[in-house]
Image (cartoon, rainbow, N blue to C red):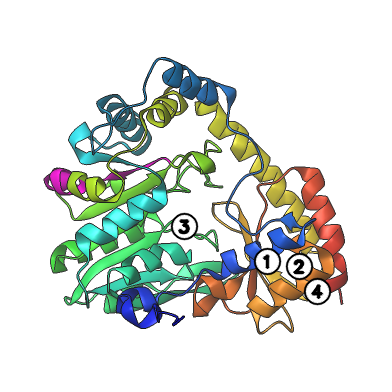
Amino acid sequence: MNTIAIEPSIAARARALEASKIREVAEAGMKLGGVLPLWFGEGAWPTDARIVDAAVASLRAGNHMYQPNNGARALREEICRYSNGLFGCSLGPERVTVTPSGMQGLMLTAQILTSPGDRVVAVSPVWPNIVGAFSAMGADIVSVPLSVQAGKWALDMEALLAALTPQTHVFIVNSPNNPTGWAMSADDQKIVLEHCRKHGIWVVSDDVYARLYRHGDVAPSFLSIAEPEDRLLSVNSFSKCWSMTGWRLGWIVAPKALEEKLGQLTEFNTSCTPGFVQDAGIVALRDCEDEVGTLSAKIKTGYQIASDRLGRFSRVNFIEPDGAFYVFFKVEGIADSLKAAFDIMHSTKVGLAPGVAFGETGEGYLRLCYAQPQEVLEQAFDRLEAVLSD
């Protein structure tokens, strides 16, 4: 029986996509067993019972049917109330599209904005799925790297503005950033937005970690300074702040003119987000603000442990993050971070993400998610001591 050659027959853009190196390590670790999983961007705690109860009640009430493409009106209005209070903006529900995950929000954003060959500029290192969505649509990705200046992650604004040429179609920024924890300042956001207005460049802001900001209740956001018709799309998610990674629920804020097309693209991708999941989201936003504060306190403790333990190793260098819940650290002597992540996993049973997964600028680094209970982190660092010590 002849084997059909599948690879040459699929789309060139699909053939060109690279597998996630984070997932590569994690899949191997799951088969290995007994590994402390610090590779994904996921807190260790379950979803609040109020949110779970809302979904169960919605199911029992018969909320089993198709929903509007752009999301249930009640959730869209609740997202507006939440965002307007948080960012000082004035959103109406016509500017909100509910998505079955923040990742799907990024994919819809890439689909509505990107044609093959479009120049897309992104700040790096960055979570690979963000730029991956635009690569899947045929974009040419140009990276502007963060660098370490005076012991802090920093963005060279002159280099960024030089990269944002009139030929650029989209600028992507994830702030606070995964993996570094860097956050763009409000002053820099104003400069970037004005520059992008001048050249007709779309700004795509991944705001998933906006509430997990170490210098206040919320990180600076383009939503606070943008006009309603600015070329800005903000993508957000329930996953991180409300411990809802498995629920797959997020949203996009976009100009009103994109509402119909975002609805059509949703129809062709998923049709809609499940109604009972949307009802859970309403309760998260309306009744569970305390859950955000509780999580913030937990990850503050996690960072203190990670900082203290990593600070004991002279071979390790890391930068204090502005937000999110990762330490992105460099180990003297490690040049191949993917190999190092596998070696560490096999020798210590601790799962870390390789820095190269976040782009070439991440090579030599490892990422550890510290959104874990104290005992898990202490055990992880006890295991890591043998490979990180002098």
**In this view, the mark in front (1 or 4):** 1
x, y percent for residue 36 = 75, 55
Location of the C terminus (image quadrant): bottom right
Percent from the top left, x then y, of residue 86?
A: 38, 35
Task: Please name the residue shown 28% across and 68% down the image.
Answer: 137
Cα separation between marks 2 and 1: 9 Å
**Height in image: 137 above or below 241?**
below
Residue 289 visible somewhere in the drawing? yes
* Disc 4 secondary structure class: loop
Q: Are marks 3 and 2 in contact (CB under 8 Å)?
A: no
> Residue at label 2?
345
Q: How far separated are the C-alphas under marks 4 and 3?
A: 27 Å
Q: Nearer the viewer, residue 69 or 383?
A: 69
Q: Amino acid at mark 4?
A: Ser
Residue indicated by mark 1? 28
Q: Is residue 250 magenta?
A: yes
Residue count near mark 4 (Cα–Cα under 10 Å), binned few <14, some 14–19, many ≥20: few
Foreground label between 2 and 4 = 2
Asked if disc 2 and disc 4 are in contact, CB closer than 8 Å, the reply is: no
216 relative position to 17: left or right: right
Residues at badges 4 and 3 in contact (C-beta under 8 Å)?
Answer: no
Q: CA distance from mark 2 to mark 4?
A: 21 Å
Return the residue at label 3. 183
Left or right, 298 with respect to 117, comes to: right
Q: Describe the element under mark 2 as helix, strand or loop.
A: helix
Residue 377: give its label. none
Name the amino acid type tagged 1: Ala
Indicate which label's residue lies in the foreground, 2 or 1: 1
Which segment did they paint magenta? 249-262
- The kind of residue tagged 2 is Met
